Amino acid sequence: MTEFGHQHRFHCIMQDEPAAMERLCQVVRVRGFRLEALAMGRDAGRLTLAFTATGQRSPAMLQSQLEKLISVESVTCAPPESARQTA
């Protein structure tokens, strides 16, 4: 756990469209999380993201909110122990 909260590792696949990353970052921020690490790749009109976010709130809540974005195709949250190993 960091001073800001627990670390959670997410994997997200979304459509590569203007402002898609901005919307994702905004949801992370508004829901009370902070991005600690982010890796992104592009392939065939899709963005593949792996990111670590810290926060006090439930990672399931953040996952649910990200899934509501139109450009997001899938979001998964890794178990807590893998977030510690990769951060």
Image: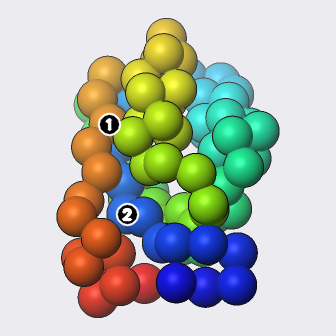
Q: Which image quadrant is residue 72 in?
A: top left
Q: Residue at x 48, y 72 (%)?
A: 7
For residue 10, side relative to residue 6 (left or right): left
Is 29 situated above or below 39? above
Amino acid type of the residue tagged 1 in the rendering: Val
CA neighbours of label 1 inside 10 A, class few (<14), some (14 to 19), many (20+)? some
Residue 75: mark: 1
First-in-chain label (1 vs 2): 2
Viewer can see residue 41: no
Q: Position of residue 28 (x, y in %)?
A: 64, 44
- Toward the viewer: 24 or 78? 78
Viewer can see residue 24: yes
Residue that badge 2 annotates:
9
| Mark 2 element type | strand
Q: Which image quadrant is residue 42 in?
A: top left
Q: How far apart are the two marked residues, 1 and 2, measured between alpha carbons?
A: 11 Å
Q: Quadrant of the C terminus?
A: bottom left
- Toward the viewer: 35 or 41? 35
Is 24 situated above or below 52? above
Is 64 situated above or below 51? above
